[in-house]
Amino acid sequence: MRSIWNGAISFGLVSIPIKLVNATENHSIHFRQIHLADGGRIRYRKVCELDEEEVPGGEIGKAYEDADGTMIPITDEDLAQLPLPTAKTIEIVAFVPADQIDPLQMDAAYYLSANGVPAAKPYTLLREALKRSNKVAVAKYALRGRERLGMLRVVDDVIAMHGLLWPDEIRAPEGVAPDGDVTVRDAELDLADALMDTLGEVDMDSLHDDYREAVEELIAAKASGEAVRPAESGDAGGGKVIDLIAALENSVQAAKKSRGEAGDEGDGEMADVHPIKKTSGKSSASASGKSSAQTTKKSPAAAKKSTSRPTPKSTGAKKSTSTTKKATAKKTTKTAAKKQTSSSGGSGTKKTASSRKRTSA
């Protein structure tokens, strides 16, 4: 990798020659501006406002615009004469726990490479000291004409440096939080925790830029003359009033489904609902007939009575055949039971009278 800056790390009285290398790269797809009428490229030209002529880069300098619009020229020689001890040095000023660095301050990232064989030993010393202390180094350095703040930490076996914004460059979050008092219920927090647990962790290396891939496919399709298929429109749900509990529950179920997890009853999974099969009139009639037969078998008198008694005819109202037969069977059963009871009572009386007659004789 090509270095963008050469200098040294100042670690007390120890000086470590290093090279600065970009640790990140931008994969964004860049577009050119064109004239829609003929496809000609649109270019920006640097033109002087006074003579309205294009000015080459070698004739362009720096100036500070005062509040009244006055331009104050500043040359490279003027800047070189300023006292800037970090012009070629990354000066470590403190070692602090990593959690003391606000992530809002994080900026560009760089790798620090030992510059030459003599730099290997002090470089390794600083790297191992950072590892063992579980701390990061706060440093000052100068790059591209200005002094900056940085944080040094260990990544694998390399010292990495994150450019940091100065504390006064971080805006206070005034007027950003929701207005008014918002109450969050414990049930909502429980569902949010369940969703977090279900989503779990992710392998950061598996994440990629879906939009960039879609743009690349679009460019390839148009370059080859293929028809571009419109993307499926998704409902982002913006601006809708939603039931937060329902949204959280659905999110948990969707997360489980996407991860292929089988739901338990205790997890609130929805059970499959199966419609109840309707009983046909024929089946009801068979059941009623079977019940009547069993009653007849138990009581011959009831069977005789049930057989001789006519079944009530259906009226003009459209009654179900199965309902009529069920009512008939029920009434028949009651009548048989009553007949059987009276018959049993009559037999008992006759037997008692006969016994008394034999006794008197």
Image: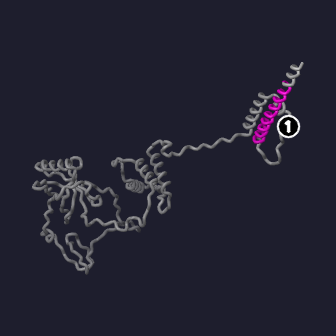
Q: Is residue 360 above or below residue 193?
A: above
Residue 47: x and y, percent?
Answer: 27, 74
Number of marks in the rendered image:
1
Give the position of the C terminus as an image quadrant: top right
In the picture, residue 96 is in which quadrant? bottom left
Q: Can you say whether 34 is above or below 126 in the image? A: below
31 or 184, which lies in front? 184
User: Residue 228's image quarter?
Assistant: bottom left
Furthest residue to the right? 361
Name the residue: 23% across, 80% down: 70
Most foreground residue, 25 or 328:
328
**What kind of colouring is applied to the model shown?**
one colour
Closest to the observer, 45 or 266:
266
Whether residue 2 appears in magenta in the rendering, the answer is no
SS state under label 1: loop
Crowd rating for badge 1 (residues with CA inside 10 Å; few <14, some 14–19, many 20+) = few
> What amino acid is labelled 1 in the image?
Pro
Magenta residues?
Answer: 322-351
Residue found at the far top of this picture: 361
The secondary structure that dominates the magenta segment is helix
Q: Position of residue 270 (x, y in %)?
A: 53, 46
**On screen, residue 118 above or below 90:** above
Observer-nearest residue: 241 or 83?
A: 241
Q: For mark 1, what is the residue?
A: 310
